[in-house]
Image (cartoon, coloured by chain):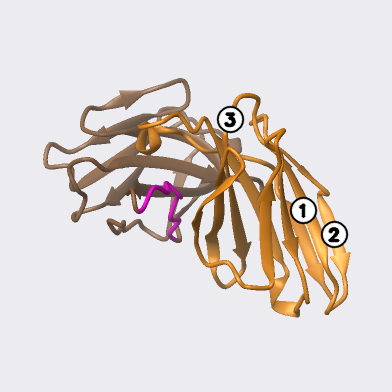
Amino acid sequence: DSGVTQTPKHLITATGQRVTLRCSPRSGDLSVYWYQQSLDQGLQFLIQYYNGEERAKGNILERFSAQQFPDLHSELNLSSLELGDSALYFCASSRGSVGSGLRETQYFGPGTRLLVL
Amino acid sequence: DAKTTQPTSMDCAEGRAANLPCNHSTISGNEYVYWYRQIHSQGPQYIIHGLKNNETNEMASLIITEDRKSSTLILPHATLRDTAVYYCIVRSSGAGSYQLTFGKGTKLSVIP
């Protein structure tokens, strides 16, 4: 158990719909990362938040957005869903200590499996 | 980001040591080598990381060559539960973000 929790575990929805995935980082971790894993693309970085502020963006579509709340949990919002958005979505967290980025280990949650029909 | 090259798949007999190689010939001096594994669609699990020296923890050992252009992850006594995809990742810092860049990894099958 990494200490990172994600809800829900599974989500089935229809094209055009909107869903919200939730992540609670490990206690004390300030950084949250979102990754997407699809069959054809592998694990890809989407976006990072640090202490409530967006830190970096990866291959995140404009239909997707995220935020990190004052209690440090994060939500990933996926809208106008398409069949190709079906994937595993992972959240990871790390301490976020200043100056230690390269040495910080990221701990991953169990993921949310999204199926768009 | 420094690119890594790993074999697509490997087999290992249960109880034997599993040695997983990784090439990272373009690694920079301040880049770390990280290893993660993913067991059947579970969240990636951190194994070990290192910069220059060899490292050991309760899960594995990491051997980094002196020129840092390659490394080997060693699982000393592989069990069936070690069957997973193993990812070798070189971490670079770009614009204040420290995301992990995953390749295709090595699918390790531990055979009874």
Contact flag, marks 1 and 2 (Cβ < 8 Å):
yes
Question: Left or right: B51 with respect to A56?
Answer: left
Q: Position of residue B11 (x, y in %)?
A: 45, 49
Chain B tint in image: brown
Q: Position of residue B1 (x, y in %)?
A: 31, 57
Q: Which chain is orange?
A: A
> Of helix, strand and loop, which one carries label 1?
strand
Can residue B66 be seen by looking at this rendering? yes
Dot 2 corresponds to which residue?
A: A11
Quarter occupied by residue B44: top right
Q: Is residue B31 one of those drawn in magenta?
A: no
> Of helix, strand and loop, which one carries label 3?
loop
Quarter occupied by residue A109: top right
Marks 2 and 3: which is nearer the front?
Answer: 3
The amino acid pointed to by label 1 is Leu
Q: Both on one chain, marks 3 and 1? A: yes
Which residue is nearer to you in this view: A92 or B7?
A: A92
Dot 3 corresponds to which residue?
A: A29
**Quarter of the C terminus of chain B within the rendering:** top right
Magenta segment range? Answer: B95-103
Dot 1 corresponds to which residue?
A: A21
